[in-house]
Image: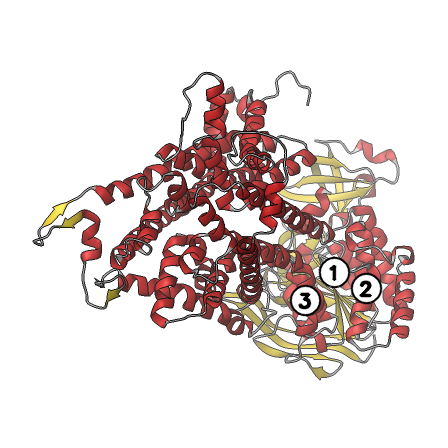
Amino acid sequence: MSTRHDVKRYPGLGPLTVLFFAYLYAPLAVVVIYSFNANRIAGVWTHFSLQWYASALNNAALMNALKTSLTVAAAATTVSSMVALAAALAIVRGKNLRFRKLSETIVNLPLLLPEIVLAVATLILFSLVGMQNGMLKLIIAHSAFCTPFAFLPIRARLQGMSLDLEEASADLYADRWTTFRRVTLPLIFPGVFSGAMLAFLISMDDFITSNMLSTGGTTTLPVYIFSLIRSGTSPELNAIATLLILASLVLATAALLAAARGARDNA
Amino acid sequence: MNQNKAIEVKSVSKSFGTYQALNSVSFAIGSNEFFTMLGPSGCGKTTLLRMLAGFESPDSGSILLGGREVVDIPPHKRRVNTVFQSYALFPHMTLEQNVAYGLENLGWNAARIRGRVGEMLERVHMSQMAKRKPAQLSGGQRQRIALARALAPEPEVLLLDEPLSALDLKLRQAMRDELRTLQRDTGITFVFVTHDQEEALDMSDRIAVLGGGEVQQIGTPTQIYEEPVNRFVADFVGETNFLNVDVLETASGQATIRTPFGVVLTVPATGRTAGGRATLSIRPEKINLGDQAQGIAFEGRITNKNYMGGYTHYTLDVMGTELRASRRNASREGDTITLGATVPVGFVPGSARVLAA
Amino acid sequence: MTDSALHATAEPERTPRIRFWHGLSFWGLLPSWVLMGLALILPIAIIAAVSVATRGAHGGFTWDFNLAGYRHILFNEGWTGELEFTPQYLLIILRTFVLAGATTLICLLFAVPVAYFICRQPPGRKAALVYLVTLPFWVSMILRVYAWMIILGKEGTLPRFLEYFGAPAGLSFMFNDGATLTAMVYTYMPLMVLPVFASLEKLDGTLIEASHDLYGDRWVTLRRVILPLTAPGIIAGAILVFVPSLGAVLEPTLMGGGKQMMMGSLVQLQFGGGRNWPFGAAIAMTLMALVMIFLIFTGLRTARRGTAL
């Protein structure tokens, strides 16, 4: 490394990268710092206080929104993970070549379409059908756009897995179901897990579709936060944001660690 | 040779698209046999092995295992186990669990499984590592576990798909001996696939040489090497010199021929060689040089010399025909055969062979 | 080692595997076809139909064929029915393109050097830095936009900071295209860094050395070796950033304010307050068409590049 002419080194990249990471994290840090400010106006620092956390945790509307979001995300994650697992098995391991490419495009379609188009399209459909159940509307729409996120890691995992292993299992007297249960599923599980994690986070995070479809009773967390932002910055918001940032970071770290460990174990 | 046929392959054909992988292949393998399918890549040997395992089905023809037609029987219902080229050890299971897997699927009870797994791990000298995962093993160790896993259910036939190809040279030699011993001790029929002729000659009871989707020759290692039936076999197994010769007369496995050097001699022959042109195959080590020259003798000029330590390869120019010869360096007297020198060259007619041109 | 590598490739026998999961194709694909058919394809078909329907008197629409939705993008209908060209919506489409393009470009400008630097770190640190790039992406998008509101807004961090150095009080950097752009670059940045990083990592370091060996300096090497070989990652990153940028809703709504709309926020408005569904559907169809054209265009280009290589 200590050559006098390291041709792969471009000067100035180190400081630039430091600045880059500062840029990535500074805005989040600002929110966190403001959340501890006693002053109603976030930008004017008076003293350290936890009062906004207390009022956030006692905010019934916030808790309702959180409950709605968690319910929708849990349901959408379950549905999309199962749909994605079945599709991935069929697409990677199935034999019908003709529909494979088309099916893959269909499953990934939500990634290619602008979400707002999908959101208004779904809104029109539901209003035409006259569907009243707000929760069900959200779950259906979320399941659809979460599916590719659940699908991609599973597909990657399946493609990375040698067919030899499934053949070895068959060779050792396991029928198809046993092979799936004891060889295929355990080996693709890290993919299923990170796919589900992704789907969950995407659903929790969604604003555009939820905002279109949400009705009085079914306000999701991002929609509620949007209304708080719109109604003038409430000091509580910084505390809520900090809690959510913390939750996402912990969840994302857990997911990434699990995925990394899975990859190492099944190397 | 055992009379019982463990495997019968009857006029099996298979094509992938326009590519004919196997063209009406037939042969039988006796039980207790160490049988090798040898051939270059694309010769169809792996396809054939996968058909025996049940991963591939023939387009036509039939395959009998222990006298029973198996073409429609799925892999998990065949008493046949495979050692995969990649070993295909389940990465999420310990070695113990890997070896137990087949036994569990066969419905053995826990105590019997435990006993058998212990026995198999003992046999491949891996008892100490029972609780490890495959990722923690070296190539040779993985190989042993793959063997233990495949042998544990006491299959009728063990299929080995180039199992030594991923090992380094020294280990490969040791594993050859180990495989051979295992086969003798267990008495299980081994069907071994390889493109390495040395491996095939070393281990097998019988060898089937495959080429172009067809069986070229089946025989013992000595038969394959010393009595090749055609050019393909003579060329693929070992090194050889081919000379175009005129056949003057054939009688009871012998042919009288005229070599390009003008000499007329009578040598062993195979195939339809009556009249006209044929090919004479003579292996480099059968050609003697210098003071060792014996049998039919003529002179040649050394045009190239490759010193390999234990032996030396020579390229000779004999009246415009190129010949390769090799000579074991039993002492240092070979040093005198130098580049450019003209030396006596000879071979014993019985060691050459006439093949159909 | 080299020996085993040689042997591993020594048998490229043409043996397409039997499909182990025979018969699974139909049942495996059925759920995704049903879900996507009901929640994706059907709604898209309906919105296509609505875009050529007639606006209802009190919001909504009636099923009468009418191109007014599309006409409204370019023309305003006067009281007497005469058409008057209004560039208002065309400007929004233009702004959408300019902002999405600028977002992509700025992301790229940062992503390439940063990804290159991360690439050259020892394995442990490299993994940690990639993790740090990914992490903010997991934070809810609305919160990431909100963070910039409290930085740029009135009484925000930046105005306060500048005030400290003598700038006039009451400054605000909000409600303009710059604010929207800032938030967009911030929210989509990881989508650019990751694919560029992935393809930089695949770049064989000896190629850089070979370029220098053949008298190329750093600039020549960057231009003629590094960038061309990272093109797949750059294109992937550009698609991942440009497509959602075109459809951005939150950034223009929150940062741009009511006036500085993009196509996404315009669509949203038509189904909220404005209530011209056919017009909203027409804009949505236009947006989708533009995205599709872009994807097909880049898809074709990469395909051609792939065959040329």
Could you say where residue C232 lies in the image, as x and y percent from the top left?
Answer: 47, 41
For label 2, the residue is B97
Residue positioned 57% across, 31% down in the render: A21
What residue type is disc 2 on?
A: Gln
Residue under numbered circle 3: A167
Label 3 sits on a secondary structure element that is helix
Rendering quarter of residue A249 = top right
Q: Nearer the viewer, mark 2 or mark 3?
A: 2
Please say if B109 is above or below A247.
Answer: below
Give C219 or B195, whichever is nearer the viewer.
C219
The reply to whether dot 1 and dot 3 touch (C-beta < 8 Å) is no
Picture mark count? 3
Q: Position of residue C178 (x, y in %)?
A: 38, 32
Q: Quadrant of residue C21?
A: bottom right
Question: Where C2 falls versus B264 (above or below)?
Answer: above
- Residue B277 visible in this rendered orientation of the protein: yes
Residue tagged 1: B90
Evaluate whether residue B253 shows in this view: no
| Residue, far bottom | B68
Disc 2 and disc 1 in contact, CB within 8 angstroms: yes
Distance Cα–Cα, label 1 vs label 3: 11 Å
Q: Residue C153 appears at what percent x and percent y?
A: 44, 33
The amino acid type found where label 3 is placed reads Glu
Q: Secondary structure at mark 1?
A: loop
What's the CA distance linking mark 2 and mark 1? 9 Å
- Point out the image quarter for the C terminus of chain B: bottom right
Name the image quarter holding the N terminus of chain B: bottom right
10 Å crowding of disc 1: few (<14), some (14-19), many (20+)? many
